[in-house]
Image (spheres, rainbow, N blue to C red):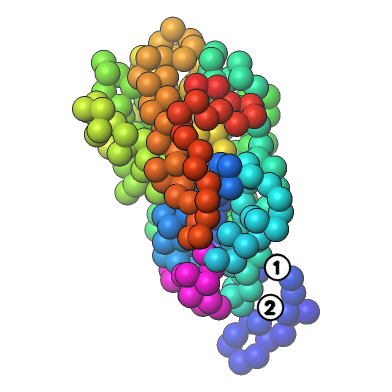
Amino acid sequence: MLQATGYKLQADMPFDFGHNVFESMRAYRGRVFCLEEHLARLAESAKSLQIKISCSHEELRQKILKELEASGLKDAYIRLSIDSQGKISIIIRPPRTYPKLFFKKGVKVIAVPTSKNSISSLFPQAKTVNFLNGIMAKIEARGYFEAILLNQQGFITEGTVSNIFMVKEKIIITPPLYLGVLPGITRKRVLELAKKLDIEVKETPFSRHELYNADEAFLTNTSLEIMPVAYIDGRKIGTGCLGKVTKLLHKKFRQGIFTHAPVPQGGTVRDSAHGLCPRGFTT
């Protein structure tokens, strides 16, 4: 029930009108990828939304690892959410898989009429359950792998659940965070990899026209890792399949997974990252 108390409207209900933060994570062979980065982003999101987390960073970390161990899953999707009252919820389930053909041939995406929320009205850097904007975009993109949102000025921002990159003349280009882009964990990892590989990167706005004429394009997120884009709005990107730069980045990403998914304290896992290929993925 809703009760008006003075000038405050209090919610006594199991939902919070989007006032809820979360993180989606991925475990590989019992090891959580970029766990510290996810927890740091969660803390920043909670601070912006004035949500008090009811335990310390280390306690939250241990809760996740304990739940993962109890699930019996080695490869897993982990969703950690905290509501407006600080209540913690952890969901562990098998990871979503995608056809191997997607990683070889690429996927089809579409730029939709729904535009990205203005950075003056919401905090795009905060990962919240306020997803109506994305739901509308998904409805408009039925039949396509992902919906790509533009901002009010017509620049590409991101997908509903992914960051987007293009490659032009061997230069990797991705929208800058100031356009209202979520600072994706996998996005950050790709930028780090490019630097190590001496591949030039530009974080700069670009239009649909520029994306149509790219040599390659790809999406990133926790579940997708690095997914090649073959077509956008019916236009073929480059050769219309997996490009050389995208292929190299995904290969190096997979090889470095365990560098960013350390063995839990007291753990004994000694897997090698080389040759690692969970269900539904291909290098």
145 sits to left or right of 172: right
| Total numbered labels | 2
Camera-nearest residue between 4 and 263 = 263
Position of 17 relative to 149 (above/below): below
Residue 49 part of the magenta segment: yes
Q: Residue at x 46, y 70 (%)?
A: 57
Cα gap from disc 1 to disc 2, whole angstroms: 8 Å
Quadrant assignment, res 250: top left
Camera-nearest residue between 97 and 208 = 97
Q: Residue at x 58, y 47 (%)?
A: 30
- Which residue was labeled with disc 2? 11
**Residue type, mark 2 in image:** Ala
8 sits to left or right of 218: right
Give, as a single range, the part of the protein colored magenta. 47-61
244 sits to left or right of 127: left
Q: Residue 147: image x %, image y %?
A: 56, 33
Q: Residue at x 26, y 27 (%)?
A: 197
Q: Residue 245: image x %, image y %?
A: 35, 19
Q: Which mark is residue 15?
A: 1
Camera-nearest residue between 216 and 28 = 28
Q: Is residue 107 visible?
A: no
Mark 1, secondary structure of its residue: loop
